[in-house]
Image: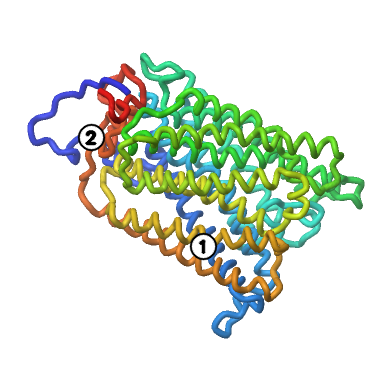
């Protein structure tokens, strides 16, 4: 991607002796006040991983309680109905707003995006640090909501229940309201960085596809997040001051809340999934040793998803009383938005075709992403068909579809990116064999957990319910065992990544043979990223196709 002339070092100089962002300056205060995008990315990464752990524990509690319809395991009642609703809500809120949405853009994106562009930092370093503290201010209010009684509305906060329940909805809504500003500021920062700080010689179509994905995501963050903020603010005002906005008894309209919420939350699905797609677009050509197929189509498809994603919110409301014209239009647009995603999958497969594929851990997660996201996308087409959706809406089929997209897509992409850039972030190599085992466990456990839920949904098992008919017990039990396998894989991942930090720096500057600019600096990177300004002299994926010279 770039020609970078390194400053000379004396013979025998080791990476430990070379100045990098991990060693200069030292001390906790230097981290808390840093404006280095890499350190801010690391702090985001630690934060989102902590919330992933908390949200994952809630998920295991939910699945354990659902192992048997009596909710009794080994003679002990796992969760009563009220506690189940709160744990269910906390799982969704934490996973969506505090983990999935910031996990790739704010954590991994913050770390690698400026280096991919050949820049020293993001366009607004102080705003970047402010975004991190705003994220934590919102997260702190969400934690207040948890310790002051929790929330039992579900992560969607549907009215009129959310405006009448006596749980800590106002605290949680304000936490998400504040955290949303972090998302907006990060998006603005990335847009400015991509526009203004590209290296000399790097045009728009010389950027890595990860940058295109972050650009599309940033557009959605900036345009859609204010709608959620206003919606939650209106809900809180109605709750506190009894002003009729969504409550029908006060002259409001509860369906209006759904329109507002899903106008944000469907683009938010793509805020979550497009970054995962962007990571897969980086991993596939590197581990196939082949130039990416259809670069411009993948780039434009990211923008296409961002644009069309704003027009399909109504497919969440097919049974909410919309006009026949509206539901037909939203059904058509739902089919249409599948096309840009299908273009990406086709181009990834075409890149792998006749490639010299190696199955290191990042590639295993990328392949898992393709397989699982394809299932999630296909079942989304089913739900976009009106006659099918009427039967499947509010069943476990929707739960399975959502998780195949969010966890099978975004989380697999996040884990793939984490392993791909771990040597660059830390300067250490993790245990490759354990990484492959963990990837297999997560893939197997994921399918064991969520595929049975497609079957249950097709048979009419409603989602969100605490109780269920005994006929569904075998599949619920199978799903619960699958969740244990996922947990084993993720805890194994945490173990070997933390263990790698105890080693001295042993990662090569470019362990995977990548062509993008972040691999042209040392591992871990210099404080200023590059010793001299890099210049783009070739494309980001200039591998010779296998079989050519």
Rendered residue at 89%/50% (across/down): 248
Q: Secondary structure at mark 2?
A: loop
Left or right: residue 149 versus residue 54 is right
Left or right: residue 305 versus residue 214 is right
| Nearer the observer, 241 or 91 | 91
Q: Position of residue 111 (x, y in %)?
A: 40, 36
Q: Position of residue 281 (x, y in %)?
A: 44, 34
Residue, disc 2: 19
| Nearer the observer, 511 or 34 | 511
Q: Are marks 1 and 2 in contact (CB under 8 Å)?
A: no
| Nearer the observer, 362 or 448 | 448
The crowding category of the residue bearing disc 2, from other C-alpha atoms within 10 Å (few below 14, some 14 to 19, many at least 20), is some
Residue, disc 1: 448
User: Among all residues in the image, which is located at the extreme left?
Assistant: 11
The crowding category of the residue bearing disc 1, from other C-alpha atoms within 10 Å (few below 14, some 14 to 19, many at least 20), is many
Q: Secondary structure at mark 1?
A: helix
Is residue 527 visible from the viewing direction of this image? Answer: no
In the drawing, what numbered circle is on residue 409? none
Q: Is residue 339 above or below residue 317?
A: above
> Which quadrant of the view contains residue 84?
bottom right
């Amino acid at each position: 991607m770039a020609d970078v002339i390194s400053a000379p070092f004396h013979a025998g100089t080791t990476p430990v002796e070379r100045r990098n962002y991990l060693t200069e300056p030292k001390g906790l205060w230097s981290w808390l006040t840093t404006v280095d995008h890499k350190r801010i990315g690391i702090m985001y990464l630690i934060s989102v991983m902590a919330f992933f752990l908390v949200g994952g524990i809630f998920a295991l509690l939910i699945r354990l309680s659902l192992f048997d319809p009596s909710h009794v395991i080994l003679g002990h009642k796992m969760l009563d109905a009220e506690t189940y609703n709160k744990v269910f809500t906390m799982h969704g809120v934490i996973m969506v707003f505090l983990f999935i949405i910031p996990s790739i853009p704010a954590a991994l994106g913050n770390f690698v995006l400026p280096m991919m562009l050949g820049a020293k930092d993001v366009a607004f370093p102080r705003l970047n640090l402010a975004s991190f503290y705003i994220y934590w201010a919102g997260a702190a209010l969400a934690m207040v909501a948890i310790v002051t009684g929790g929330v039992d509305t579900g992560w969607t906060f549907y009215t009129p229940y959310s405006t009448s329940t006596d749980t800590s909805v106002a605290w949680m809504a304000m936490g998400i309201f504040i955290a949303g500003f972090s998302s907006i500021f990060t998006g603005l920062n990335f847009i400015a960085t991509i526009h203004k700080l590209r290296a000399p010689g790097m045009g728009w179509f010389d950027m890595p596809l990860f940058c295109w994905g972050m650009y599309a995501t940033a557009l959605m963050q900036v345009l859609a997040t204010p709608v959620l903020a206003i919606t939650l603010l209106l809900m809180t005002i109605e709750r506190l001051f009894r002003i009729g906005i969504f409550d029908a008894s006060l002259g409001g309209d509860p369906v209006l809340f759904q329109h507002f919420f899903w106008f944000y939350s469907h683009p938010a699905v793509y805020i979550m999934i497009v970054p995962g797609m962007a990571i897969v677009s980086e991993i596939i050509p590197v581990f196939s040793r082949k130039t990416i197929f259809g670069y411009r189509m993948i780039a434009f498809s990211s923008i296409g998803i961002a644009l069309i994603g704003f027009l399909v919110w109504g497919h969440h409301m097919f049974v909410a009383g919309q006009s026949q014209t509206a539901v037909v239009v939203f059904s058509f647009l739902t089919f249409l938005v599948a096309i840009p995603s299908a273009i990406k999958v086709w181009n990834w497969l075409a890149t792998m075709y006749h490639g010299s594929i190696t199955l290191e851990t990042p590639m295993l997660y990328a392949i898992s992403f393709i397989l699982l996201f394809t299932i999630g996308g296909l079942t989304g087409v089913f739900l976009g068909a009106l006659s099918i959706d009427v039967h499947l809406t509010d069943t476990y089929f929707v739960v399975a579809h959502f998780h195949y997209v969010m966890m099978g897509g975004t989380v697999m992409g996040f884990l793939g990116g984490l392993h791909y850039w771990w040597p660059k972030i830390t300067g250490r190599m993790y245990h490759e064999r354990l990484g492959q085992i963990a990837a297999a466990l997560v893939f197997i456990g994921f399918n064991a957990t969520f595929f049975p839920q497609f079957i249950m949904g097709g048979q009419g098992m409603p989602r969100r319910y605490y109780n269920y008919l005994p006929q569904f017990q075998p599949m619920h039990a199978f799903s619960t065992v699958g969740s244990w396998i996922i947990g084993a894989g993720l805890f194994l991942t945490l173990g070997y990544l933390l263990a790698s930090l105890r080693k001295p720096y042993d990662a090569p500057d470019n362990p995977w043979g990548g062509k993008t600019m972040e691999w042209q600096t040392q591992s871990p990177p210099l404080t200023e990223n590059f010793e001299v300004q890099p210049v783009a002299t070739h494309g980001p994926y200039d591998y010779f196709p296998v079989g050519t010279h």
